Amino acid sequence: MKQERQVLVIFPHPDDEAFGVSGTISAHRAQGTPVTYACLTLGEMGRNLGNPPFATRESLPKIRKNELLQAAQAMDIQDLRMMRLRDKTLEFEEDEKLKQMVIDLVEELNPSLVISFYPGYSVHPDHEATARAVVAALAELPPAKRPVLHCLAFSNGHEEEIGEPDMIHDVSAYAEQKKDAMRAHLSQTAWMLADMEPKWNDGDPEALAWLQRERFWTYRFDD
């Protein structure tokens, strides 16, 4: 994996980072690269309350905040930013406000790499609003000063439109950190882990491939 100057990860919800990026984050941290994770909300409107339920609608924000802190620790993220926007409302925020939030982060941190969602191919309205803001903010930078943008995409049929991923990171060396990041978000991941953990332990090829390979598309700006 290329040595970066600074990595900036921008997602809307706690646990967005765990599934597709936590191995990559762990790899960057192992290289000594500073990683900042800007999480826009606390996921307080998440549907899951644990299995069996251990959260209520009132207690969920605090629980998810603590889960995010634990996940950051699992990945050795030293700079976690909780941006305090409200879950499931990002699509209603002013575009300029979200764009400026990203611009401020980029100006402060001067990252060589930004990781977020691919606009149009990330399903959830909060994901899409985040992706649009990241692209709009980076598009305002001169190409020579613009960080590379690596995106996650997972909508149905996305590869038919944007092609195969530009890179697939082998993060097998960081599989345990990735598992720990997912386990940290237990209120949201208990059902999935109950299904996946036995498959990992049994060496199921498809489950291991998902665990050990992380896929990214490089966003290409028009200029």
Image: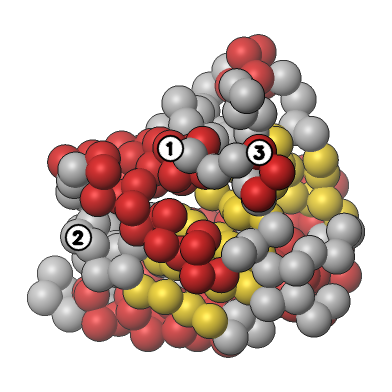
- At label 3, counting other C-alpha atoms closer than 10 Å, the crowd grade (few under 14, some 14-19, many 20 or more) is few
Position of 137 compared to 97: left or right? Answer: right
Q: What residue is shown at x 64% (from left), y 62% (from top)?
A: 111
Nearest-to-viewer mark from 1 and 2: 1
Q: Quick one: which residue is furthest to the top in this view?
A: 160
The amino acid beneath tag 3 is: Pro
Position of 144 compared to 68: left or right? Answer: right
The residue closer to the viewer here, 16 or 82, is: 82
Nearest-to-viewer mark from 2 and 3: 3
The amino acid beneath tag 1 is: Ala
Q: What residue is shown at x 45% (from left), y 84% (from top)?
A: 69
Position of 82 compared to 2: left or right? Answer: left
* Disc 3 target residue: 143
Label 1 with label 2: CB-CB less than 8 Å: no
Q: Looking at the picture, how far across and down is residue 120, in whole percent?
A: 45, 26
Let me know if residue 202 appears in the view.
Answer: no
The numbered disc on residue 73 is: none
Quadrant in the rendering for residue 46: bottom left
Answer above or below: position of 214 versus 71. above
Quadrant in the rendering for residue 63: bottom left
Q: Looking at the picture, how far across and down is residue 37, in whole percent?
A: 52, 69
* Disc 1 target residue: 136
* Disc 2 target residue: 86
Question: Helix or strand or loop: what does disc 1 sit on?
Answer: helix
